[in-house]
Every structure is written in C-alpha cells, then in structure tokens.
Amino acid sequence: MAHPAFRAAAVRVRVPATSANLGPGFDALGLALGLYDDVVVRVAESGLHLDIAGEGADSVPRDESNLLVRTLRTAFDALGGQPRGLEIVCANRVPHGRGLGSSSAAICAGLVAARAVTTGGEAKLDDVALLELASEIEGHPDNVAACLLGGFTLAWGESGAVRAIRMEPAATVVPLVFVPARPLATETARGLLPRAVPHADAAVNAGRAALLVEALTRRPELLLPATDDRIHQDYRAPAMPESMELVGRLRAEGVPAVISGAGPTVLALADEAQVDKSALLAGEGWAANRLSLDTAGASVLPLAGAAA
C-alpha cells in the first residue's frame, strides 16, 4: 500500500454518547443519545498538539497514550501510514467512567477523523472495516455500533467478524440519564460477573431482549417488561448500590429503568408523562438530564462552530 496523502484542511467529527445493554441485551444492544463530543483534527508539519476542554480535561493524558490519539494512530496504520504531525482539539461532553460510552466516543471519533483527513480514506477503510476496527479496540461491539450508526443497534459476531444493524427507536421514547458523582471503571463492573449464569435466567433474558427490539421500535408500552434483566445488573450491584436502588425505585413506579452500560449511570426510557415523576423519584445526588435520541451517529460536520 502506497503511503497515503492527507488533506490540508482540518476535519470536524461529532460522536454521540451511547447506552449499551439496555437491560437484557448484554454486549449486543445499544442506543445513541443526544449528547456529543466534538473533535477537530488537522494534519500538521510535525509533532502532536492536543487541546482538551470539558469532560476529562483535568485527567486524560495529552500525549501518545491518549485513547483518541492511539485510535488515530491505529487508523492511520490501517490506511497506509502516519502523518508527519497532528493538531487535535476536543470538546468533550460525554461523562467519563459513567457508562455512557466515553471510550467508544473517543474510538469512533479517532477512526472517522483519520479516514476523513486521508485522501481516499473511505475506499481504504469502509464502514464494515470501521466497525470491525472499533470493536477490536473497544473489546465489544455494542457501544461502538450505536456510536457509529446512531439510533438503536444490534451487534453480533459472525464467523469471526462483527456485524451490526440499525433500527429506528420510537419517537415517543424520552431518554433520561441520572449520572452519579462517582465514576466506575468498566473493568471493575465486568470483574463482578460470574463465569456462568443459571439456564432459567439466560432464557428470561433471551426473551426479554427479543421483546425489547419490538418495544423500543414499535411498542414502547412494553418497555417495562422488555428491560427486565437477570444476567448482569444484580451481579454488579455491590459496586453501585445507589444506582441499583434507583433502578428498583423507578421500575416499581412503572418507569422502564436500567443500568446504562457498565454503570453507574441510570437510564430511564420514559414517556412524556413519566419525565417529572422520574426526576422526583431520583431525588438529590444525581445529575439528571433529559436527552434526545441521536439518529445520525458519528458524523463529519462543517468546521464552522467547531470545538474550541
């Protein structure tokens, strides 16, 4: 492969927050949410300059160990070679370590930006390859599929490859996220999962996950039973008791609530009539946000109004 040529102009990429699992759809189902990170990437003459504002600005590294930079490097390798230098500006709004897909956002932003600044990038790294590479970096496909495609996604492995389909979530669904002050590492949450689960629980989850596809796309009135989970949330409860207590409190009042991803954020897939009640049930100690459903996924946008 010949060394690639790079565009002189900067590119701006916007990537959404995501919620994975959605109750029973462990490592398979994902939902894109209307909360975004913006990344501007420009090929420079030399060096690496990384400017970060917003979430993680005081904690994430500003060198080659940064996840976004590492992903850009991986993508450039796949595209044929590295640029001489990079200038990167990030405006981060997706909370870190809260189960809203911040790592997937960084990974997808890096892949899409690298492809966009490379001449002929889409021919060298198509959408299928982009999903494969994102899943390899992240370790599982649920968040990255939703981040890349937008909407409601189902991802799976097939003969060693990763596949995903996008579905349109019902417009009446109102995502509410309740974000606690303390983060939780995904590795910690995964470490609490058992090596095996009872057959009966697996059967319940299989039925609920199938029902969730129907409920979230066409029959939101079924979201409460459809979001029932038996194989991961209760096992993770010791790491986030307040989150699980809030899930139980909301569900007892008829609000379809789940742990978002590995937690500790709580996601409610409410209807309009449940919004105020949900906020009251949550009480103090949570950053409560009503979000939209993202339908675009990772997008290359005009540079005007870019991150600063």
Image (cartoon, rainbow, N blue to C red):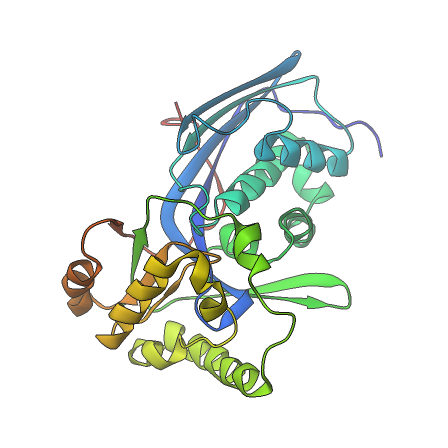
Q: Position of residue 47 (x, y in %)?
A: 65, 13
Q: Where is the C terminus found, in terms of image quarters?
A: top left
Residue at the front extreme, as displayed: 238
299 vs 4: above or below: below
206 vs 63: above or below: below
Would residue 252 be found to the left or right of residue 30 on screen? Answer: left
Can residue 173 be seen from the camera position used here?
Answer: no
Q: Position of residue 24 (x, y in %)?
A: 48, 73
Residue at the right extreme, as displayed: 1
Depth order, front residue of 281/155: 281
Residue occupying the point 48% across, 49% down: 101
Residue occupying the point 33% across, 81% down: 222
Q: Quadrant of residue 58?
A: top left
Q: Where is the N terminus found, in terms of image quarters?
A: top right
Q: Position of residue 244 (x, y in %)?
A: 36, 64
Can residue 35 be seen from the camera position used here?
Answer: yes
Would residue 127 be found to the left or right of residue 56 on screen? Answer: right
